Image: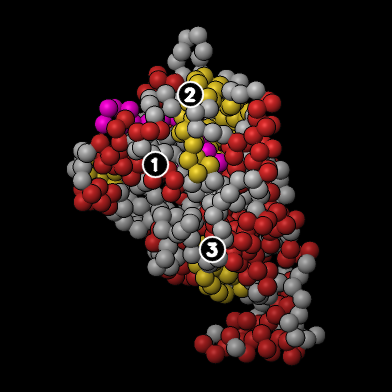
Amino acid sequence: MNDNDRKGITPDQLRSRWWFDNPDHPGTTALCIERYLNYGITLEELTSGRPIIGISQSGSDLTPCNRHHIELVKRVKDGIRAAGGVPFEFPMHPIHENVRRPTAALDRNLAYLGLVEILHGYPLDGVVLTTGCDKTTPAALMAAATVNIPAIVLSGGPMLNGWRGNERVGSGTIIWELRKRLAAGDIDYADFLSRASDSAPSVGHCNTMGTASTMNSMAEVLGMSLPGSAMIPGPYKERAMVAYRTGERIVGMVWEDLRPSDILTREAFENAVVTCSALGGSSNAPIHVNAIARHAGVELDNDDWQRLGHEVPLLANVMPAGAYLGEEFHRAGGVPAVMHELLGAGRLHGDALTVNGSSLAENLDGAETLDEEVIRRYHNPLVEHAGFLNLKGNLFDSALMKTSVISADFRRRFLSDPDDPEAFEGRAVVFDGSEDYHARIDDPALGIDETTILVMRGAGPVGHPGSAEVVNMQPPEALIRAGVESLPCLGDGRQSGTSGSPSILNASPEAATGGGLALLESGDRLRVDLRRGEVRLLIDDDELEARRERLARQGGYRYPDHQTPWQEIQRSMVEPLDRGMTLGPATRYRDVARVSPPRDNH
């Protein structure tokens, strides 16, 4: 079936006609048209019934992981024009994970808001959303869900494999390893930087299954990007080819009136949870996927992530949970090969609709793994149960633990007591923000040993603000030199999706909004029980309540003042990590392009 057979609207129903061809308001129409002509676009292009397609440009010098979109969108425009559309490129607020302070997560909601206003208030019939670096993908999908005009995601793809000699060097993942080597005295500062640079050999986002690769994979799994497109490496010729096809396809979606609300269904989000577990996906994925779901009107929570995903096996042998990188994963079949295994095992909703107009099952026909070492068969996984546990207790209502990265060493030291399996206890040492951690972690007076549980608080959406990736704390240098390279970590912030540490993350509510971590004191004993899904502070309820009352008398948990207007605005309305760190009022707005068309400006 071709696009013309599936038209859902006619040229006079194009949204852009309200601006560019509205005889009932000739003055407003003239004002809208005349200034666009000043750079050479023609009156015929704007008034002849051709769809106006926006291209959200996330590439810039400030966002190096997405910068090649500056070139890629040329192919998107070619595809749009070939299919009979008119492309309009516009900038997206930059979000660069590694550099943005106090955290790139602060800008996810800001970029979302900007995109909503652009997609709602300008003459766009459809949009291509260029994504790559971590937060650009959820920001784009949140906005698409809110405005609900035809939309399609184009990932920039991962970098080529990093190498040092014959050793694979995974982006992000190598940083956490090199920090330990530097602390142990095995390398110096210059060698640290040199080896870290090996992990970024080309254009593209992280070549590991960190948050960038995970979220672009989730866009494909949700049905919002063309099948097989998420993990094509950025420099490959196929990346420019899929850019062209994406441009072609968005025009067809406009004529079919195929919108995010048709694709972002409950079944699509359940597919995302299951596939994320099989990919060994980032611990940031539940935050962002829950946020996209809420903007789409689908209630998804962390209990769903455990119920649907915990028992899913790990199939993608990709760092940080595995051994390979993005190039091998793509050549082995990429996301479709993983989903093919899951569909065959009855784990996916095969009838979910996707942007190419076909069902998920139709797209996956014949998409078997091409390398069973890189993408395992369902019956031969790397890990039997690879999803997330949603832990609860007397300190928080929800905190996630990514089980696919529990190493053999960690399991031996903390989870292998035959009299108390899958559980451990330890003395807590508490840090208030990353600055406090860096200042004090090597202080011998803290008494940190191989049984200590490191706790990070003040790192959530309000406390940091934006929620920082600081929970994966390494032990003191003295312990690292003695061979103890990891300790249990717990916190109300996040950690990098490229980290292989099995931390307990995203504790909600956070300390800054009255969560129980604010009551914790260094020296307290904590019990972590994975079988029961609990983390408990081992003091009696009366003492816990006395601490709560004492903290209230002191004015609550203190965190740094706002540094910018946006920090204050976000802090005033941001929701906890388990609810997606969304802006509370924003989730009430859905399908705004149809429910509330923009008012006239003249």
Query: Within 10 angstroms of label 2, few (less than 14), some, or many (20 or more) residues?
Result: some
The residue labelled by disc 3 is: 563
Query: Is there any visible trace of residue 264 in the rendered image?
Result: no
Q: Residue furthest top?
A: 419
Query: Within 10 angstroms of label 1, few (less than 14), some, or many (20 or more) residues?
Result: few
Asked whether disc 3 touches disc 1, contact meaning CB atoms under 8 Å apart, the reply is no
**What SS does tag 2 mark?**
strand
Q: Establish if 35 lies above or below 259.
A: below
Give the residue type at disc 3. Gln
- The residue nearer to you, when weighing 319 against 2, is 319
Q: Which stretch did the figure color magenta?
A: 480-495
**What SS does tag 1 mark?**
helix
**Mark 2 → mark 3, Cα distance in angstroms:** 36 Å
Q: Which color scheme is applied?
A: secondary structure
At which x and y percent is residue 266? 69, 42
The residue labelled by disc 1 is: 440
At which x and y percent is residue 559? 56, 51
**Mark 3 → mark 1, Cα distance in angstroms:** 24 Å
**What SS does tag 3 mark?**
loop
Which one is earlier in the sequence, the residue at label 3 or at label 1? 1
Which one is earlier in the sequence, the residue at label 2 or at label 3? 2
Give the residue displayed 75% in from the left and 86% down from the top: 602
Give the residue type at disc 2. Gly
Indicate which disc residue 426 carries.
Answer: 2
Give the residue displayed 70% in from the left and 54% down from the top: 584
Main secondary structure found in the magenta portion: loop
Question: For residue 593, what is the image quadrant?
Answer: bottom right
For residue 327, side relative to residue 74 (left or right): left
Query: Within 10 angstroms of label 3, few (less than 14), some, or many (20 or more) residues?
Result: few
